[in-house]
Amino acid sequence: MIVTMQQNATKQNFEKITTYLMNKGYGIKDSSSENLMVFGVIGDTKSLNPNDLEAFEGVKNVTRVSTPYKLASRSFKKTDTIITLANGTVIGADQFVVMAGPCSVESYENTLEIAKSASKSGATILRGGAYKPRTSPYAFQGMGIDGLKILREVADKFNMAVVSEIMSEDLIEAFEPYVDIYQIGTRNMQNYNLLKQLGARTQKPILLKRGMSATIEEWLMSAEYIMASGNENVILCERGIRTFEKYTRNTLDISAVLAIKELSHLPIVIDPSHAAGKYSMIERLSMASQAVGADGIIVEIHPDPEHALSDGAQSLKLEKFDSMMGKLKELSSVLDKKVK
Amino acid sequence: MIVTMQQNATKQNFEKITTYLMNKGYGIKDSSSENLMVFGVIGDTKSLNPNDLEAFEGVKNVTRVSTPYKLASRSFKKTDTIITLANGTVIGADQFVVMAGPCSVESYENTLEIAKSASKSGATILRGGAYKPRTSPYAFQGMGIDGLKILREVADKFNMAVVSEIMSEDLIEAFEPYVDIYQIGTRNMQNYNLLKQLGARTQKPILLKRGMSATIEEWLMSAEYIMASGNENVILCERGIRTFEKYTRNTLDISAVLAIKELSHLPIVIDPSHAAGKYSMIERLSMASQAVGADGIIVEIHPDPEHALSDGAQSLKLEKFDSMMGKLKELSSVLDKKVK
Amino acid sequence: MIVTMQQNATKQNFEKITTYLMNKGYGIKDSSSENLMVFGVIGDTKSLNPNDLEAFEGVKNVTRVSTPYKLASRSFKKTDTIITLANGTVIGADQFVVMAGPCSVESYENTLEIAKSASKSGATILRGGAYKPRTSPYAFQGMGIDGLKILREVADKFNMAVVSEIMSEDLIEAFEPYVDIYQIGTRNMQNYNLLKQLGARTQKPILLKRGMSATIEEWLMSAEYIMASGNENVILCERGIRTFEKYTRNTLDISAVLAIKELSHLPIVIDPSHAAGKYSMIERLSMASQAVGADGIIVEIHPDPEHALSDGAQSLKLEKFDSMMGKLKELSSVLDKKVK
Amino acid sequence: MIVTMQQNATKQNFEKITTYLMNKGYGIKDSSSENLMVFGVIGDTKSLNPNDLEAFEGVKNVTRVSTPYKLASRSFKKTDTIITLANGTVIGADQFVVMAGPCSVESYENTLEIAKSASKSGATILRGGAYKPRTSPYAFQGMGIDGLKILREVADKFNMAVVSEIMSEDLIEAFEPYVDIYQIGTRNMQNYNLLKQLGARTQKPILLKRGMSATIEEWLMSAEYIMASGNENVILCERGIRTFEKYTRNTLDISAVLAIKELSHLPIVIDPSHAAGKYSMIERLSMASQAVGADGIIVEIHPDPEHALSDGAQSLKLEKFDSMMGKLKELSSVLDKKVK
């Protein structure tokens, strides 16, 4: 951490902050010159908040040299994290993983139809919401535990894995028998209790969606919460960020895939359904996800999107999904990560 | 709700969506003309998501006429909601309410010093974090229940009320004896379980901070969650939104106060500390908060911000706070809402 | 255009606005029902601003049915606009066009080295700044007319076309002999005088970069300015938008390509250099640009980026560019638009 | 400027960049320690772009110590810039200046009615658009030079000054006899030619509106362009920035006033009309502008907003403006800057 003092800072200002840091056990490397007071802070600065140091009088700014996260960082672990699921799906290696399913689980029959078709098209993970984070208290809130049971039963028929969103730490035990991957939704990316509890109480992988307005650093800090609590199997999911542009529901930050690959060893998938909010854009955004180097996608599909219980506008019809999978396979023939 | 069809929509498209809606019990008011198919949906559309209707082929866009929230809306309840606390503080009427205290509760002595000074300066509510939502798992996470006990004991000495942030529904019973107001932080604004549980399990007021990138409508929908669960004592808190500008920590959306006063009957306060992230801006932003018509402010203060355990850069020294209170009193002399 | 009145609007409110519109020559299609006053405005509403109508008392909101642009819209012209340059490059058809060159023209020799290499790698258009829009008045402002001459002379040696940014309508005559494509930079996207003058005074294509915070609609409106002034050869260029995320210089809005293809018949290229601001991301973002269906890319390259006069951090070395072109060719083998 | 190298940077990386800088005439203050290479760049770094230095291999980040602007900075000129107009209005001292008038000049009679009323209410500067930057090429583009003549003639009747927007450097001579203040609109904040030409060719004050998505630093850099070209009479104008929130037309960044007062000596006014886009919010936002310490406001008013040729929704009726002025006067009685 490098602390630069203001040009009108006094010797007293300098001594006050350096004494404070030395009392906390940090070393100080004074690098001041005639016109400028500047110093480095030596030691483990992960628990130091630049913001707090800026409270000291005479401080101009504080710059981190090392990242505030450790376990999630590429510099801590050089090799890619690879996650293997019980059904054989491998995330983070040379497979381009496809997760597909309905926004909300609606019924056994509906889920069966979707899973059968998705599996045939090449998806190996079944997604589906049993507990739904709806903006309105008056909207359908999901089937709950019954939804999870349906997902599991149906997925097993096609050797698919199950991913579903959990919204409360009180439900971890209830989820454990039914899911292969726990999903943390965008609205809960900084629900620190949920992060800590999941980190401590399950070893199954966690799909961590990026918060709507989370920086890449904050997102990795949330991954760090899970990892520091004991579970290092984190899969990141870029799902679009909130910007001024309203033609699409969110703005897919495709460069985030490259940023994560530089900064971290964790796998990352893209959710084109929530990013765009329009089914017409999903195929092409999925192709772009492949080309940019993502480890997979998670897509909403439905036999009859117009009658879906939620998010119809962004759900792909089963036959459109099948045709898209054909294109993804063709594209993957010239790329490193292959569609199964 | 008004549905406009695309210019190339077919009669079949029109019939499919209107049939779907009629099957759900809605009335249809067809308003099409020669060049344009458009119709209104009659009935309680609160649980209808425009997004879902846009899934239907041929639909161009769907516009809400009534708000998606009801209990929180000005049209449902014309008169301002007024909340009276046990210590006599009245929020939402002609008082400009000042909540002040440390970012984190650090010790009994420290809290006592702050409360004594804050109370003398005119603050009637003591704020303080016992459970802290820290971005880093390695940062100080708060004193927990001991922090709440200190807040209560100290506040009682000066007839102050207590507001503190709750991050998990599992802690509601633990909080109940100690706080007068439950605070929901910006990162939990859409933690729907927490909203519902607080709505159902306490009648004490809830201070609902705006999410970092929440629209005003989403914010009121979160208030609606609490209210629909049984607790109508919601106080909104604008604390700055996330934008491209990084000179300040967040961008204080001062117009949000006016928007809320138009759309809702709920009281609204401003948090200038988090909005600016710089103590030098707090006095003037507090004066602006008064002038724009907010019901109060919530401010971080500390006897020695440089040694605060968190958020030092945005904490006001006790004497600066006292001098600011003098200015707020003077300003309030020509405004409707008075500093006590 | 559909006008919805507020629920407490009066008959007088309704009559005032409809009379106003009828006096302007518009027809009114009244679609009100018992609970709701709503009407359509019949006629050419392109010059009507929804904002102005919202000034009328009792108006709740005003929704456009047709787009505010006409010449640029897909509904006005169904087939893709295809632009053929003098050197045979075809933009908007089945070619994936690559424009490459230095951020700023620095010297004849430097430009020659770049163009020779770029051309060999497969670029057919030479980009280069002669007049530079620099944030600082103290930074290098470009070589001016001499830079244009160098670009032309060098490009001709390799049968390349020239694209360069114009910042003032006073320079149109000076540019005309030297460029094949006029570039309008992101900071001038709403410099309406420049748009109108270019539209009226040249028939050469205009590369219109998206403003840093321009919506897709505003961007197409700026294209409409050029087209309505007489020049329909507009090429759109997505170059990243400004968001809260600062790890990348801007956020590449890759979905914008799909939006433009839906809404307009104009070709669109992507500028990955400015979008990311990091050379390490350019190859993968270019591959994603191909996969999403863009008509081409515009990339900054330099033999020695560390000594470039501007934008070194986002310039690709010549050999990296060559290797990237190999990947783009391979990828294009399974896509519609081919790298030459 | 402080350059921090990556942790895996080599001695060669370090030497390459420091040699480059020394060749450019800068001094190097090496402050490296065992674990970290870091150095300061000594000399006038205003023309150095951190971005360019980040192109060097092994560089982690580059932090400015001094601001990239000089003439506009508070550290260069400690005392507030005070601008006195021919009619006696003083901007930047203890007056709270009110500029008011129609969005567009519509006719002599209309302007006369507005100016007469505005002047009586206490406005001393008449605003009005003669050349309008309209998003649509089909919308009313302003009366042009005739509009300027009307403004001048009418303003003189009431000893008012005139401010009007200029969109092209070709019009400077035409504007000069008619305006007291040249306005640069939000869309032209980075039209560098316009900035330079105005800086060089007039000594009349320039009202520089903040770009829709301009950072405070970029805004001050644009002021620097004008000042470095010869005209130091710049008045800044905050008019709302573009964010995700759409309930208001823009988000008024009220903290920007405080930021500017810290960083610069230039006066700053607020435009509540464009910030909110709703007339109902103007009174309270103007009061907040006063309370936060702005030097004045610029407001759109109209005798009949519903029939205004532009921006009706955000124009205040004359009697509402008069009543607002009464409140501003009352509020200013307890503040430093007084309404005349």
Image (tube, coloured by chain):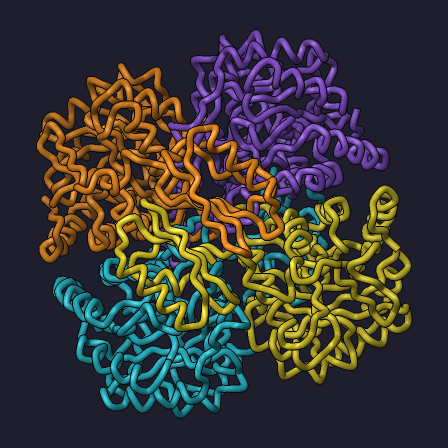
Chain colours: A yellow, B cyan, C purple, D orange
Q: In this view, does D135 lie above or below D276?
A: above
Write down the quadrant of residue D299 in the picture: top left
- Residue D222 percent across, percent down from the top left: 35, 33
Q: In this view, does A174 lie above or below C332?
A: below
Q: Quadrant of the C terminus of chain B?
A: bottom left
Tell me the residue at 52%/17% (across/down).
C199
- Residue D257 percent across, percent down from the top left: 28, 48
Q: Nearer the viewer, residue A78 or A211?
A: A78
- Residue C115 percent across, percent down from the top left: 67, 18
Q: How many marks can you see? A: 0
Q: In which quarter of the image is the N terminus of chain B?
A: bottom right
Q: Can residue D70 be seen in this view?
A: yes
- Residue C295 percent across, percent down from the top left: 71, 30
Q: In this view, does D208 lie above or below C247?
A: above
Write down the quadrant of residue C293 in the picture: top right
Q: Is residue D338 above or below residue D91?
A: below
Write down the quadrant of residue D108 in the picture: top left
Tell me the residue at 43%/21% (across/down).
C193
Q: Which of B64 and D62 is in front in this view?
A: D62
Q: Can residue D110 be seen in this view?
A: no
Tell me the residue at 65%/58% (across/down).
A75
Tell me the residue at 22%/30% (across/down).
D233
